[in-house]
């Protein structure tokens, strides 16, 4: 969210065309589950089956169940595995619109005491004196977004899922092994021999979705040869709820404010490096690793120390050629997986959730088939262009900022300084960072679906 807004909303059409062109040029590659404990019957019947109970699929399952849609959600992993600290050490920047969705779904009530508001964002190009500064007070009282540790968000979603036993069957651990579509339903086969039958199947399986491939939906994409190293630090000085992003030649280095733990000031780091160098950094002993980190953080937070394990995530971009196929729909990373330079991947997934829930709930109220063609087509139109724009923006930003080429560096520094000098432009960028512009689903505007 930090800097994706810089280009979002401007040359989106041109950027979309560019990616369509890229998609046409590149060879396309083929890729392809309510809380019902494992004593569930051999055939589980539901209105909608959601495959994948990650942060996107889990949120979608909560949303559908809250609005009376009988949902089966399947994940190959135990919920207890997914909330463990060792499973996911990241923290996510959730835009204000995403927080509104989580509030409407009850998930946020489990996160009140776990989130840190992002009040300001400072973007700097390496050691350049030119920088960009966003301050939420320029546009209102609400913060630009919130930082939440993924393990807390995953736990909040898991807790909320348990609160809808009549509408939500949770099937986990269980892997989907096959899919058969007929005129009115889709039947999923599970590894243990059970089946789930639903009118609509939604893949929230992440990047490696099987259902996407089984449905004949192809993907385009590339690897960045970059790896994000993620860890948590404690520091002497308060971060004052300010998120920092420093563009270094190998990739962005983000210092993201976390809620204090008692008297301990904490931040989450996302340090992007060339993949070969990143593997070397991952093997350093703690004191050498800390030295590298302290050097990149600089002195403004006082003495820093490591308080969390290290995680590494190879980075890539992957985009599905379409988001729907008959009674199948894709959400989250199953549909689009993007560079984390702007902290937008999950935010896009939450928008998919809000849009698809609105379409399904509106359709049900009108007595329509949950996979009615107009609704499915509307989802595709609504979400695909928005996601594609952000995929292109993040790709361009990464290419523009992750280098040390003199003329490019000079022009991007001047660009940052220019935006910083023009208040109306700054405000537009901030609204993009908050996710409050564009064709927002009702749940993201804080409106209930009735
Ligand atoms: C370093 C880093 C930092 C990031 N920071 C941010 C940020 O600040 N803000 C932001 O908005 N985004 C951020 N992102 C992006 C964000 O983390 C992802 O977009 C998001 O996690 C995708 O969630 P998902 O639920 O779609 O997919 P996943 O997290 O991949 O979940 C998929 C789920 O499906 C299950 N599954 C898969 N296949 C099957 C199957 N066949 N049967 C049953 N279950 C199955 C898996 O077990 C898993 O639980 C970041 C990403 C990285 C790498």
Image (cartoon, rainbow, N blue to C red):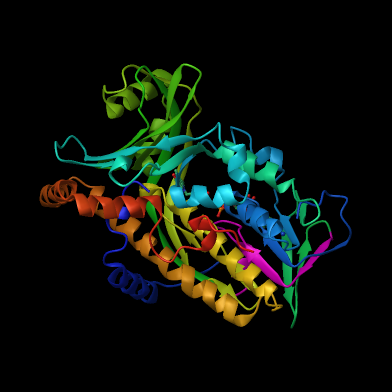
Q: Nearer the viewer, residue 83 or 212?
A: 83
Membership of 210 in magenta stretch:
yes
Please, is residue 392 above or below residue 399 in the view?
A: below
Membership of 211 in magenta stretch:
yes
Q: Nearer the viewer, residue 90 or 59?
A: 59
**Residue at left offset 64%, top offset 37%:** 83
Give x and y (percent) for residue 37: 82, 48
**Residue at left offset 18%, top offset 50%:** 419
Give x and y (percent) for residue 346: 49, 51
User: Quick check: can you spot residue 86?
Assistant: yes
Instruction: Answer with the quarter of the image where residue 325 lies.
Output: bottom right
User: Quick check: can you spot residue 32?
Assistant: no
Decide if residue 358 is on the left or right side of residue 423: right
Decide if residue 305 is on the left or right side of residue 53: left
Q: Nearer the viewer, residue 148 or 400?
A: 148
**Residue at left offset 65%, top offset 68%:** 361
Tell me the magenta residue range: 193-216
């Amino acid at each position: 969210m930090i800097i994706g807004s810089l280009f979002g909303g401007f040359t989106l059409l041109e950027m979309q065309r560019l990616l369509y062109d890229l998609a046409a040029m590149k060879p396309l590659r083929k890729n392809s589950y309510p809380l019902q404990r494992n004593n569930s019957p051999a055939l589980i019947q539901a209105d909608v089956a959601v495959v994948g109970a990650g942060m996107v699929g889990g949120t979608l399952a909560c949303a559908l169940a809250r609005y009376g849609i009988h949902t089966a959600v399947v994940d190959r992993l135990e919920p207890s595995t997914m909330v463990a600290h060792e499973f996911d050490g990241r923290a996510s920047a959730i835009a204000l619109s995403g927080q509104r969705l989580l509030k409407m779904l009850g998930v946020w009530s489990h996160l009140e005491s776990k989130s840190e508001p992002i009040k300001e964002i400072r973007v700097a190009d390496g050691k350049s004196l030119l920088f960009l500064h966003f301050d939420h007070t320029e546009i209102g009282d609400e913060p630009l977004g919130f930082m939440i540790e993924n393990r807390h968000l995953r736990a909040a979603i898991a807790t909320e899922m348990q609160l809808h036993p009549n509408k939500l069957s949770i099937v986990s651990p269980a892997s989907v092994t096959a899919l058969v579509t007929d005129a009115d339903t889709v039947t999923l086969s599970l590894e243990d021999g059970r089946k789930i039958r639903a009118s609509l199947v939604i893949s929230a399986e992440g990047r490696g979705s099987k259902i996407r491939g089984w449905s004949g939906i192809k993907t385009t994409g590339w690897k960045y040869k970059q790896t994000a190293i993620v860890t948590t630090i404690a520091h002497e000085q308060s971060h004052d709820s300010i998120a920092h992003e420093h563009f270094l030649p190998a990739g962005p280095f983000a210092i993201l404010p976390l809620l204090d733990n008692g008297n301990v000031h904490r931040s989450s780091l996302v340090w992007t490096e060339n993949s070969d160098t990143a593997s070397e950094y991952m093997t350093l002993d703690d004191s050498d690793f800390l030295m590298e980190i302290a050097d990149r953080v600089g002195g403004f937070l006082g003495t820093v120390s490591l308080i969390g394990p290290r995680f590494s995530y190879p980075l890539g971009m992957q985009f599905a050629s379409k988001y729907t196929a008959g009674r199948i729909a894709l959400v989250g990373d199953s549909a689009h997986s993007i560079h984390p330079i702007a902290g937008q991947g999950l935010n896009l997934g939450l928008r998919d959730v809000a849009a698809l829930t609105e379409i399904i709930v509106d359709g049900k109220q009108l007595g329509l088939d949950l996979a009615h063609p107009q609704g499915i087509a509307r989802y595709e139109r609504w979400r695909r262009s928005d996601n594609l724009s952000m995929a292109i923006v993040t790709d361009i930003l990464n290419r523009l900022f992750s280098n040390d080429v003199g003329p490019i560096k000079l022009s991007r520094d001047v660009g940052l300084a220019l935006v910083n000098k023009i208040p109306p432009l700054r405000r537009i960028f901030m609204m993009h960072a908050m996710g409050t512009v564009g064709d927002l689903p009702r749940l993201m505007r804080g409106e209930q679906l009735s």
